[in-house]
Amino acid sequence: MMATSAVERNVALTINGARREIPETWSVADLLVSLDLDPRLVVVEHNGGILRDRESFPRVPLARNDVVEIVHFVGGG
Amino acid sequence: MAHADVLSHESATHTDPQPFVIAGREFRSRLMVGTGKYGSNARMIEAVEASGAEVVTVAVRRVDLDRSKDEGMLHHLDPSRYFLLANTAGCYTAAEAIRYARLARAAGFNEWVKLEVIGDRETLLPDTAGLLAATRTLADEGFKVMAYTNDDLITALRLEDAGAVAVMPLASPIGSGLGMLNPYAIRTIKQRLTVPVIVDAGVGTASDACIVMEQGVDGILMNTGIAAASDPVRMATAMRHAVEAGRLAYLAGRMPRREVAVPSSPSAGMLDP
């Protein structure tokens, strides 16, 4: 009981150009949930590589100093 | 009965006999429209609807995590009704444009891209060397590249060689509304290329669109000409008619220009003075 409630630590990473702190246990899917983003409507680039398979988001862990870009379509010509 | 015959004859000869096909895919409208610079998304949707366009361009940008800006286009545009064509607007190098194109493809709608590699912040004219390099790379990766370029024939030919599925010369600079500055160049590009030629940028009003289509090009892509009109929805309707009118006039073949008048009414049968 006392061993399982370890203190949750945060890590700092860069998301869309800004430094943010998130719990170190979070996956990409957790991050999107916390940002209230529908994974079907965004594309995620993680440390320079595009995550092509949205199904994989829960299995992609985030770590200290990762660089994440979350993009979507906006109006344009 | 006779009246009905006339009508059916008219509908057969008044329509465009050639389907509008790019890279094997047929599109229902020769007018493609952008979705930028609208005052509201509701207005944008109404204008896109009025334009009759099937191909609708979008840009790839960071999600605003603080949600101070409006939500993404997919909240507004139904991707089953429109063909979403992502652009690489704002990219100044081939590498940057390639990155944006890959991100757009990962959105999962199609492998098409309206490729822009801009060379100058003031004129937004394309960097043709970067454009050619990016076209080669993306075509090799299976992208259907529609390349936004200037009205230079040699660059257009090189883009076709590099694997572009359509070449998109400008009528005049992006957002300028100056209309077509060099009809000779546009006609020459159309005559020399095998892939479709779609004029992109510079169309300011319906007559501009009509004159562009009269050069025989395959289509037009425009954004500001509609979005920046006082009444975008009405202008979108005007552009739809103008693109159709210009296309039909091109197919009909205009009369030769003459420097002298030729009477339209018979000279015979006049009364004695």
Image (cartoon, rainbow, N blue to C red):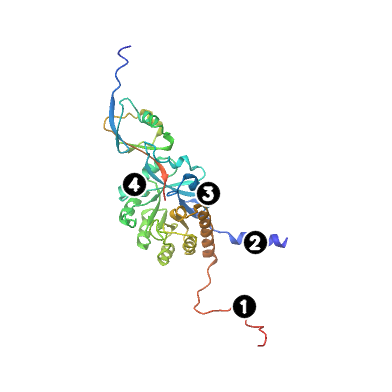
Res. B49 mark = 3
Q: Nearer the viewer, residue B186 or B175?
A: B175
Q: Nearer the viewer, residue B117 or B138?
A: B117
Mark pair 2, 4: CA separation: 49 Å
Mark pair 3, 2: CA separation: 29 Å
Which residue reaches farthest top?
Answer: A1
Please state the horizontal and vertical placement of residue B102, each as a whole percent of the image. Answer: 36, 43
- Are the numbered discs 2 and 4 placed on the same chain, yes or no? yes
Please state the horizontal and vertical placement of residue A34, each as a whole percent of the image. Answer: 38, 29
- Circle nearer the N terminus (3, 2): 2
Mark pair 4, 1: CA separation: 61 Å
Which residue reaches farthest right?
Answer: B1
Mark pair 4, 3: CA separation: 30 Å
- Circle nearer the N terminus (1, 3): 3
- Residue pointed to by mark 1: B265
Q: Disc 4 or disc 3, which is closer to the eye?
A: 3
- Residue pointed to by mark 2: B9
Q: Amino acid at mark 1?
A: Ser
Res. B98 mark = 4
- Are the numbered discs 4 and 3 placed on the same chain, yes or no? yes
Q: Amino acid at mark 2?
A: His
Q: How many marks?
A: 4
The subunit carrying tag 2 is B
Q: Disc 4 or disc 1, which is closer to the eye?
A: 1
Residue at the spot 35% in from the left edge and 62% down from the top edge = B154
Relative horizontal placement of residue B221, taking residue B267 as reference (left or right): left
User: Does the image show residue B28?
Assistant: no
The C terminus of chain B sits in image quarter: bottom right
